[in-house]
Image (tube, rainbow, N blue to C red):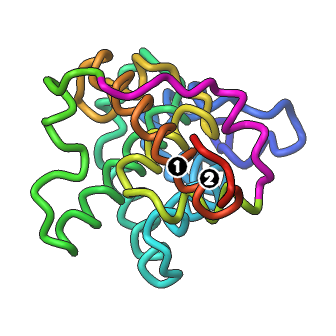
Amino acid sequence: MPGDPERKKSGPKRSDSELVQLYLRTRESAYFTMLYRRYSTKVFSKCISLLRDEGQAQDATQDIFIKVYTNLAKFSERSKFSTWLYSVTYNYCIDYIRRKKKLKNVFSDEMESAPDMVEEVDDSELLEIEVERLKVILDRIPPGDKAVLLMKYQDDMSIRDIAEGLDKTESAIKMKLKRAKHKALLVYEGLYKKNSVL
């Protein structure tokens, strides 16, 4: 069959953008399945990192891909597909945590207007921390802070992409990142440098 998506398995790997466009044009589920296979492990990893429960992370991964599947036509390609997918993932997990803990808003609106009272933490201070220690630190800071740090430093998302994904202003995201880095460094100092003064 000429339009069969599985026919060119040995050909060049299709880009995310091509797969999205092919799916939207043909509605062949095999194109979406390719995206799912490409990203499901990464999405699951982000879910388990934030939700810290394997069963919840598996359910969340399925829910996220259903959400992406039903909203694929809304993907505007202003950013990469992976950036959009990760924004959906972080939003889903943060909403889940908020509902579970009955929190008003994990990404509190106070960050929109609060004065800048936190000293800037240089990126290198966080990036020099050993990976295992960094995992411990990230698990001890609030989920909203953890999410923005992962979006910026693990997923390499721009401030603009994070702001769009979380429906916040760029200045709010800059402030959130600044405070999140400060909290992470405080936890690091408390756990691993008890004799140091920040």
Tag on residue 189? 2
How far is the residue under mark 1 from the one under mark 2?
5 Å
Decide if residue 46 is on the left or right side of residue 196. left
Q: Does 119 appear in magenta?
A: yes
> Few, some or many C-alpha atoms within 10 Å of disc 2 (few <14, some 14-19, many ≥20)?
some
Give the percent coordinates (x, y) of residue 62.
Answer: 43, 68
Q: Secondary structure at mark 2?
A: helix
Q: Secondary structure at mark 1?
A: helix
Tag on residue 128? none
Look at the image and give the residue range highlighted in magenta.
117-131
Toward the viewer: 56 or 107?
107
Q: Residue at x 16, y 51 (%)?
A: 105
Give the percent coordinates (x, y) of residue 83.
Answer: 51, 32
Mainly helix, strand or loop, the magenta region?
loop
Q: Residue at x 30, y 16 (%)?
A: 171
Toward the viewer: 37 or 148?
148
Residue ID for mark 1 = 186
